[in-house]
Amino acid sequence: MGFKPLPAAVAVAIALIIWFVIPVPAGVTANAWHLLALFVATIAAIIGKAMPIGALSIVAIALVAVTGVKSRFVCVAGGVILIVLGVLPKMAALVESLPTVV
């Protein structure tokens, strides 16, 4: 599978446009708006299959930590959850078997 530069560039462009070009709406904090930018870019990268989803999720968590949008403890907890789900296939199967919310 590997890295695909075009979908990655589109995801980065989306994040930069939301982060720097679109003004923060009234009633929304700057950190919340920046987190939305990272979230939308991550979803765009997943849809475009820029990288394998495991690598993409770790990059997304690292970006949240590096940019300071959320505290590093939140990012560490997300990383631990990803590692546990990756190391323990039964836990990943359990999470995957949960029904979707309507």
Image (cartoon, helix red, strand yellow):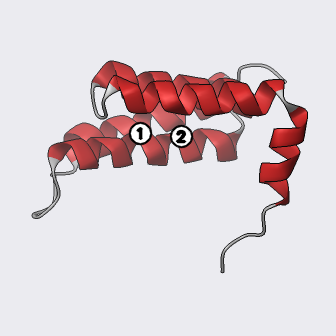
Q: How many labels does the image show?
A: 2
Viewer-proximal residue, 39 or 65?
65
Secondary structure found at label 2: helix
Q: Which mark is residue 42?
A: 2
Q: In which quarter of the image is residue 13?
A: top left
Viewer-proximal residue, 71 or 10?
71
Viewer-proximal residue, 54 or 73?
73
Q: Which amino acid does label 1 sit on?
A: Leu
Q: What residue do we see at 42% from left, 24% from top?
A: 63
Label 1 CA crowd tier, 10 Å (few <14, some 14–19, many 20+)? many
Q: What residue do we see at 47% from left, 21% from top?
A: 62
Q: In this view, does 38 lie to the left or right of 99?
A: left
Do we see residue 6 in this rendering?
Answer: no
- The residue beneath circle 1 is 38
Q: In which quarter of the image is residue 85?
A: top right
Q: Is residue 85 left or right of residue 70?
A: right
Q: What residue type is labelled 2?
A: Thr
Q: Where does residue 91 sit, x and y in percent of width and height?
A: 82, 41
Q: What residue do we see at 78% from left, 69% from top?
A: 99
Q: Where does residue 92 sit, x and y in percent of width and height?
A: 82, 41
Q: What residue do we see at 48% from left, 24% from top?
A: 76
Secondary structure found at label 1: helix
Q: Where does residue 42 sit, x and y in percent of width and height?
A: 53, 40
Residue sticking out furthest to the bottom: 102
Split into 4 quadrants, where in the image is the N terminus?
top right
Do we see residue 18 in this rendering?
Answer: yes
Q: Are marks 1 and 2 in contact (CB under 8 Å)?
A: yes
Q: Residue 55 carries which label?
A: none
Q: Label 1, label 2: how many angstroms apart (C-alpha)?
A: 6 Å
Label 2 CA crowd tier, 10 Å (few <14, some 14–19, many 20+)? many
Split into 4 quadrants, where in the image is the C terminus?
bottom right
